[in-house]
Amino acid sequence: MFEKRKLMKFPTALAIELTGGNEARLRKLIDYGVLVETGNSVEIESDYLNFFEEVLDVNEEISVLSVQECINTLKEYIGYYLKETNEARKEGYQNSVRQILRKTGFRTLKNVVDLKRKMDETYKQEPNYAIKKDKLKNLDEKSHSIRSMIKECEKLMDNEQAFFIMANDPHMAMTCSDVRHDFVEAYHALMEIDRQIIIYINQIDKQNQLYKKIRKLKYLQDQLLIKTSTNILQVLQEKNPLWMESRQYSKIRLSLDMLRGNDQIVNIMRRIAERNGIQKTARTEAEPLTDEDLQAHVRQLKAVDPEEVWNAFVASNYNLFDFILRYDYKSERSIEDHAALFCQLVILHPDDCRMTGEMATYQNIEYPIVYAK
């Protein structure tokens, strides 16, 4: 029944069907006051309806008074807090202020969301122009009221510095920051809503004027007075009757033989491309490859396989650095390359290296004596 609450009143037969076909269950709901019986129909009691809408957050009404009520309650509890001497009761008032602040920010954002939805629904679905315009004006007034409530709440938070200094609660500070952020977001959304409402109202006025003109022309046409009472023939003669048609484009495909043998056509196409800002140049034929380009070129890289070097080192009796110096690399290498390879092999095989704890020096490079296990 709550899902079908837009019907407001349900016939008794439909109500019994919605309660599972159990008339006793329906009668019990009526006796407990959840449903109200009026003649041959029933409806959900307003308190329960409001409760479900608030809990499920499906209330579509834009309630500016609820925000104003929260602000008034805030003022009361802040006054109670400043006058209270008992610490326990002061903490209770402080928690109430924090909860009401959070509720104020939530209700403000919800009102803005509902206002945006109502605005779009009114403009797109309301068939009566006069009612549509009045509804949009009422929504515009509610937008200004919400903006006034936001300014009043921000002013309250700025003026009650004594309360927030005495409260000295990090949760209170976080709540105030969240509420201010909600207000900024709501304020920006309201500015966009005001702009959109003005656009909608102007469009409605324009459509209404056009509708009135069309009705008047229809009346004159029915009375056979349209030619003598208006200048419609002159207006129609001055208009281009093809203005609503899309422009026709004819694709002319030129043959490749014509393009190859006629320089005049190529020059004309080049001028057309320059006039239209087309800067893509024609593709030119590449130069033929020479015999040198077709020959194989081999480039030898100074790469060393660390695993190959390690396997050879394991089979030797040298320490690691001496072995790296003696190894045949097939290419010239610097001392920095040898040091880098030494560090790489130690990192790759830490468990297979036997550290002696002794140190040696080679060309100002000090290195540890490492053997294979």
Image (spheres, helix red, strand yellow):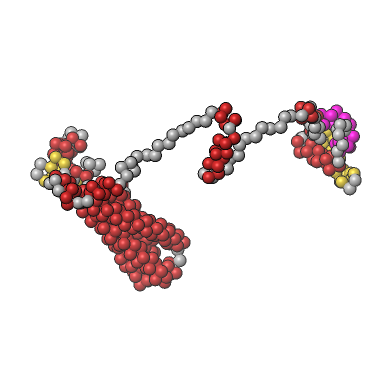
User: What span is in magenta?
Assistant: 309-326
In the depicted structure, whether residue 181 falls above or below residue 25: below
Quarter holding the C terminus? top right
Residue drawn at (21%, 45%) of the image: 6
Quarter holding the N terminus? top left
As for residue 340 lying within the magenta part, the answer is no
The image quadrant that residue 325 belongs to is top right
Q: Nearer the viewer, residue 43 or 126?
A: 126
- Residue 94 image point, x, y percent: 38, 64
Residue drawn at (16%, 50%) of the image: 228
In the depicted structure, whether residue 162 falls above or below residue 50: below
In the depicted structure, whether residue 273 falls above or below residue 97: above
Q: Is residue 269 visible?
A: yes
Task: Give the left or right position of residue 275, taking residue 372 as reference.
Answer: left
> Which SS type dominates the magenta stretch?
helix
The image quadrant that residue 63 belongs to is bottom left
- Residue 244 image point, x, y percent: 33, 42
- Residue 355 image point, x, y percent: 83, 39
Q: Is residue 90 visible?
A: no
Residue drawn at (86%, 34%) of the image: 331
